[in-house]
Amino acid sequence: QGQLVESGGGLVQAGGSLRLSCAASGRTFSTYGMGWFRQAPGKEREFVAAISWSTGSRFYGDSVKGRFTISRDNAKSTVYLQMNSLKSDDTAIYYCAVKGQSGSYSYMGSYDYWGQGTQVTVSS
């Protein structure tokens, strides 16, 4: 097993930016990559972005394409989510997760363990 530590959430005005970080410890070397999901009040958890450890391939949810960028630092086992042009609809708890299973990067079932979440609030 491993542990994920998220940071970088907070309150920002619409149109602003935030950068989230997720540091993984433990058995990350045998995993496929990492991803970010988010959950707004009263809504289901949705896929935001993911990245492959080995190839660096990036995947994004439709609602964040062109605004969010995911990146990785393999040496630090850390993944970042740069969020620009934030909207009120981006308000949610953001979770990072380790993808230990084969399958789609956008499928929650492909992820083995999850961080505790970090709150992002965008004021309009």
Image: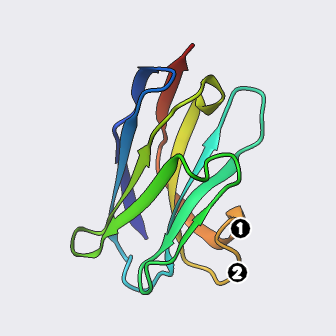
Q: Which residue is mark 2?
A: 103
Q: In this rendering, would 91 be left or right of 2?
A: right
- Given residues 20 and 68, the one toward you in this image is 68
The quarter of the picture where the C terminus appears is: top right
Residue that appears at 34% across and 37% down? 8
Q: Is residue 81 above or below residue 118?
A: below
Give residue 123's position: percent from left, percent from top.
53, 15
Q: Residues within 10 Å of mark 1 (few under 14, many from 20)?
A: few
Q: Is residue 103 above or below residue 44?
A: below
Residue that appears at 42% across and 27% down? 16
Q: Residues within 10 Å of mark 2 (few under 14, many from 20)?
A: few
CA gap, disc 1 and disc 2: 8 Å
Mark 1 vs mark 2: in front? 2
Q: Secondary structure at mark 2?
A: loop
Q: Is residue 6 above or below residue 3?
A: above
Residue that appears at 56% across and 58% down? 49
**What scheme was used to colour the molecule?**
rainbow
Residue that appears at 65% across and 84% down? 102
Is mark 1 in CB contact (under 8 Å) with mark 2?
yes
- Given residues 41 and 71, the one toward you in this image is 71
Say how many tags the image has: 2
Q: Is residue 56 above or below residue 93?
A: below
Give residue 81's position: percent from left, percent from top.
42, 51
> Which amino acid, mark 1?
Gly
Query: Residue 96 shows which numbered tag?
Result: none
Q: Secondary structure at mark 1?
A: helix
Point out the tag, 1 or 2, that comes first from the N-terminus. 2
Give residue 68's position: percent from left, percent from top.
50, 49
Q: Which residue is mark 1?
A: 109
